[in-house]
Image (cartoon, helix red, strand yellow):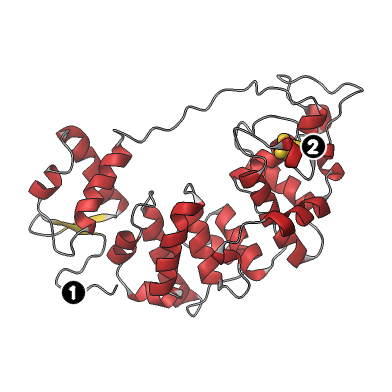
């Protein structure tokens, strides 16, 4: 964990007029009060929402904006209200219903996780972090998010928003820089209120603060509930001196080509010949590379006659949705 005395040399050292707040200085109640007044009304945060609904929302929200997730999450919940319902359907339907959320391996893994929940946990979402992490596609973040938000566990939940808030408020850095998930989890652990239910709300409150106020490019410090104790503010808001992240482009990438090929397969439950896929992207080398990667990822399968289908597609069967 980075402490006040081990601040990075690229940033100005604290003077008598400035100090790094450190974890102990931040007051969780200020963030909890702000959250109670300012939080977005998101359906997966409603009381009574199932652990499965929380899990699906957390998987969908990875690298995907809330506005795009909302309609897809609602569709998934209506169609597959529990793990058993999804496990009973084909993985092809999960990939098809993922639509344009991006990173469609998430759909495949969610389907595999649903199958394991049926076979290993009687169709229920497990509550222990270790059990959650043992499921396909459920990593350290998602496991803790589900344990906290669905089961009220006291466990540190650290996403990119939380990392950014900690970098600024605790360490006095403008940006988080290199990923230090374990250290950030330790920081959050120290900040969590003792009572598990409050701790779970605190985790989502810090995430919300990062999403709405302490944003990546334009933190709204005057509106921030912890501005008086924020290490970055106390240090005089020093500029970020670390390496710049290059913006990820999408146009022309293999990701875009994969999406185009999947669009062709999503549009039909019938097997598709290579000719139809050839029409999806002009560059043959890139198209071939994307198709091979989809096959290797298991998102696309090839039949004995050479035609292609979505993962686990059962040609000739009626779609469920
Ligand atoms: S005061 Fe500004 S930089 Fe500090 S936590 Fe709040 S929004 Fe982020």
Please state the horizontal and vertical placement of residue 9, each as a whole percent of the image. 74, 20
Looking at the image, which residue sits at the far right?
16
Classify mark 1: helix, strand or loop.
Answer: loop
Please state the horizontal and vertical placement of residue 190, each as a whole percent of the image. 79, 50
Residue 148 sits above or below residue 227 on the image:
below
Residue 276 sits above or below residue 285 on the image:
below
Q: Nearer the viewer, residue 111 or 61?
A: 61
Q: Is disc 1 surrounded by few (<14), some (14 to 19) or many (20+) residues within 10 Å?
A: few
Q: Which image quadrant for residue 236?
A: top right
Point out the quarter of the image occupied by ligand 1: top right
> Could you tell me which residue is drawn at 75 percent across and 37 percent down?
222
Looking at the image, which residue sits at the far bottom?
122
Please give the residue where the numbered disc 1 appears in the rendered image.
317
Quarter of the picture holding the C terminus:
bottom left
Does 164 sit left or right of 118 as displayed?
Answer: right
Please state the horizontal and vertical placement of residue 77, each as a whole percent of the image. 44, 71
Is residue 162 visible in the rendered image? The answer is: yes
Please give the residue where the numbered disc 2 appears in the rendered image.
230
Residue 150 sits above or below residue 107 on the image:
below
Please state the horizontal and vertical placement of residue 269, each as a whole percent of the image. 18, 65
Classify mark 2: helix, strand or loop.
Answer: loop
Is residue 292 visible in the rendered image? The answer is: no
Does 200 sit left or right of 306 as displayed?
Answer: right
Quarter of the picture holding the N terminus:
top right
Q: Nearer the viewer, residue 234 or 277?
A: 234
- Give the numbered dot on residue 261: none
- Report if the beta carbon of the residue with label 2 is closer than 8 angstroms to ligand 1: yes
């Amino acid at each position: 964990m980075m402490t006040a005395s081990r601040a990075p040399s690229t940033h100005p050292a604290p003077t008598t007029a400035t100090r790094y707040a450190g974890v102990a200085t931040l007051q969780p109640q200020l963030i909890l009060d702000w959250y109670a007044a300012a939080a977005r009304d998101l359906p997966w945060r409603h009381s009574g929402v199932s652990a499965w609904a929380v899990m699906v929302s957390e998987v969908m929200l990875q690298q995907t904006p809330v506005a795009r997730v909302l309609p897809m999450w609602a569709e998934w919940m209506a169609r597959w209200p529990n793990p058993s319902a999804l496990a009973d359907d084909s993985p092809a339907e999960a990939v098809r219903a993922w639509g344009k959320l991006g990173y469609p391996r998430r759909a495949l893994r969610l389907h595999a996780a649903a199958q394991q929940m049926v076979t290993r946990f009687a169709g229920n979402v497990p509550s222990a972090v270790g059990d959650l992490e043992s499921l396909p596609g459920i990593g350290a973040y998602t496991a803790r998010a589900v344990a906290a938000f669905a089961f009220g566990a006291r466990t540190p939940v650290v996403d990119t928003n939380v990392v950014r808030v900690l970098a600024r408020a605790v360490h006095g850095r403008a940006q988080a820089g290199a990923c230090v998930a374990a250290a950030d989890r330790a920081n959050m652990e120290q900040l969590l209120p003792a009572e598990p239910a409050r701790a779970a709300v605190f985790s989502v409150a810090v995430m919300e603060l990062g999403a709405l106020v302490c944003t990546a490019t334009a933190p709204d410090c005057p509106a921030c509930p912890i501005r008086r104790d924020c290490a970055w503010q106390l240090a005089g808001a020093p500029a970020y001196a670390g390496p710049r992240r290059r913006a990820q482009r999408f146009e022309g990438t293999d990701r875009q080509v994969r999406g185009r090929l999947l669009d062709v397969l999503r549009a039909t439950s019938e097997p598709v010949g290579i000719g139809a896929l050839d029409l999806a992207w002009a560059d043959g080398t890139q198209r071939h590379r994307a198709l091979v990667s989809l096959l290797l990822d298991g998102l696309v399968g090839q039949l004995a006659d050479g035609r292609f289908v979505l993962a686990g597609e059962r040609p000739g069967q009626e779609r469920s949705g």
